[in-house]
Amino acid sequence: MHSTYPIGTAGQKWDEAERQAWRDQTTIKRHYQHEVVAKIKALGEQFNVKQYGALSYDPDRYPLFCIKSKPWHCDKPVVLITGGVHGYETSGVHGALQFAQSEMARYSKHFNIIVAPCVSPWGYETINRWNPLALDPNRSFYANSTAEESANLIKLVASLGDNVLVHIDLHETTDSDESEFRPALAARDGIEYEAGMIPDGFYTVGDSENPQPEFQAAVIESVSKVTHIAPADDKGEIIGSVVVQDGVINYPMVKLGLCGGVTSCTYGTTTEVYPDSPKVTDQECNAAQVAAITGGLDYVISQLK
């Protein structure tokens, strides 16, 4: 399907002029400091809140924080929770914060836990998938990344060593993926836009190089108690990928530069909530993210016994 995006010339990749035009039409729509940073800092007595970087676009406005369990025991496996890699995916950010507020202390008995709840705060404020350079942080997890958001998280993960056992990356699939972000991507790359279908419900993306189907199933089972699971389409797919089990597809995480490949963890998954469904509320979306984490961690605990 051909789509005329308002920026750029059909069939031509964007240059800096087009990227600037795209950047100029972005606006601040919500407040990272008030809505996210304040909640992170409120956890400072219970956990170790650390700044692991800042975005050069405005370092004072966009500091990057993580929340770490304390005390940190060297003999415990590490769990990494990331949210807001795509800043516009609201429940990724607030689901991570809700987990830290309500469940992290309990699971810290079994794990060292580190939560990076908002990897892309500029994207959070402008409700965008990209960063200001029209780069997708969730395709930028590779050596010498040009996306600051990704590079800062890579550095944080490197500081954890090689003992990250679990990584759960919290995302959403929204109607705006088809109305705005995928058409913009096609325009930026000078290719023709082909319309897709947004799945109605929750699903996960495993690593095709390490799929861990029983772990994925535990996540899906836990989430199914909170919200509905996305069905496969008439091709047996979700967003163009084969459904390998109920509510699960797989991607090659490292090859695609996805956040899900930022560690060499044994158990990893990327969650996808559908916040635009008439069947859910914002709070249910946050609760689904928490259920994904707890379901996954409960499974891992059962394997460690």
Image: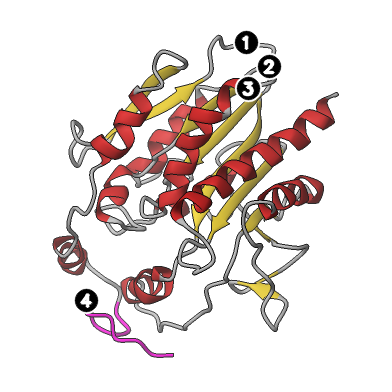
Quadrant in which the C terminus appears? top right
Task: Measure the C-alpha gap from mark 1 to mark 3.
Answer: 15 Å
What secondary structure characterizes most of the magenta part? loop
Tell which of 95 and 211 is nearer to you. 95
Residue in view at x 23 percent, y 43 percent? 31
Contact between marks 2 and 1 (CB within 8 A): the answer is yes
Q: In the rendered image, which quarter is residue 134 located in?
A: bottom left
Residue in view at x 50 percent, y 47 percent? 286
Give the amino acid at mark 3.
Arg
Contact between marks 2 and 4 (CB within 8 A): the answer is no
Task: Measure the C-alpha gap from mark 3 to mark 2.
Answer: 14 Å
Q: Name the residue under label 2.
A: 76
Contact between marks 3 and 4 (CB within 8 A): the answer is no
* Camera-nearest label, 3 or 4: 3
**Residue found farthest to the right:** 305
Q: What stretch is highlighted in magenta?
A: 1-12
Residue 257: x, y in percent? 51, 51
Q: Residue 106 carries which label?
A: 3
Task: Measure the C-alpha gap from mark 2 to mark 4.
Answer: 50 Å
Give the amino acid at mark 2.
Lys
Q: What element carries label 4?
A: loop
Q: What element carries label 1?
A: loop
Q: Name the residue under label 1.
A: 73
Sequence-wise, the earlier of marks 2 and 4 is 4
Task: Measure the C-alpha gap from mark 3 to mark 4.
Answer: 49 Å
Residue 235: x, y in percent? 70, 82
Residue 199: x, y in percent? 57, 71
Q: Mark 4 points at which residue?
A: 7
